[in-house]
Image (cartoon, rainbow, N blue to C red):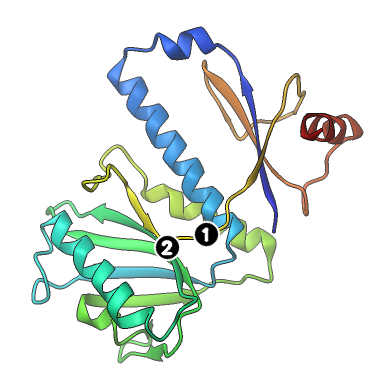
Amino acid sequence: MYYFLGFEEVNKKQVNNTTDKEELQRQSLSRTKRNIKELALCNSFTHFATITVNSEFCDRFSLQSCQDKLKYIIQKRIRIRNKDFAYLFITEKHKNGAFHFHGLIKNLDDLYTNENGYLSHKAFDEIGFNSFLKINTENNNSYDKVCSYITKYITKDCVKNENNQIYISSRGLKKATKYQIKNANFDEWTFENDFCKIKDINLETDTLSYNDYYILSHLED
């Protein structure tokens, strides 16, 4: 799957002069959502993951403790046997202050069905309850919905780690090829505000007009 993002700047001066903290936060979250959706769409993940941290294994109210435990399990318990294991995890905070993870994964061997009927993995059992729901990757529309759904966990209440990151992902994930589109006349935009317009395009599934193709080809040259 090749996923392209087109951008059209609307008011660059207004963007540069923005001082409203709420608006700056909204822009930051919007960029993060686009980054996450881009990684999700470009990497054909096979399972949707949910991991609830158990206080017996680490301090579930400490962001650093939870993320360190997750990273340890991935690096020391999983990637040793699954070199191609790829992941994209978002840290979410419960109302009670405890942390848990949602994400997308692929190339994870040795999944088993736990006593509750969920797919789990023994390595992730070392952090708490975990379940992996298989994604229908043969249906592009279904997969797109999962990729959009994962971004719902990105809100203003999201927490960042010491590297100022909201999400944790494996290295080497594929990213979109980006084209800047000028003077494009799309009927609908994926995102639009006073600062910019953004159109997400999947050239394998979306129907584009001749003029749209011309814009992409012209800018590529």
**Where residue 6 sits in the image (x, y, percent)?**
66, 33
Tell me which residue sits at (33%, 90%) in the image: 114
Mark 2, other Cα within 10 Å: few <14 / some 14–19 / many ≥20: few
The amino acid on which the numbered mark 2 sits, given as a three-letter code, is: Ser
How far apart marks 1 and 2 lie (CA) works out to 7 Å
Instruction: Name the residue nearer the viewer: 55 or 70.
Output: 70
**Where residue 219 sits in the image (x, y, percent)?**
78, 29
Instruction: Name the residue nearer the viewer: 133 or 15.
Output: 15
Tell me which residue sits at (11%, 57%) in the image: 62
Left or right? Give the position of 44 relative to 215: left
The amino acid on which the numbered mark 1 sits, given as a three-letter code, is: Leu
Q: Tag on residue 18?
A: none
Tell me which residue sits at (58%, 51%) in the image: 175
* Number of disc labels: 2
* Residue indicated by mark 1: 173
Q: Helix, strand or loop at disc 1? A: loop
**Where residue 44 sits in the image (x, y, percent)?**
59, 65
Q: Are marks 1 and 2 in contact (CB under 8 Å)?
A: yes
Image quarter of residue 49: bottom left
Image quarter of residue 155: top left
Q: Helix, strand or loop at disc 2? A: loop
Left or right? Give the position of 116 relative to 103: left
Tell me which residue sits at (62%, 48%) in the image: 176
Compared with 123, 29 (above or below) is: above
* Residue indicated by mark 2: 170
Compared with 126, 216 (above or below) is: above
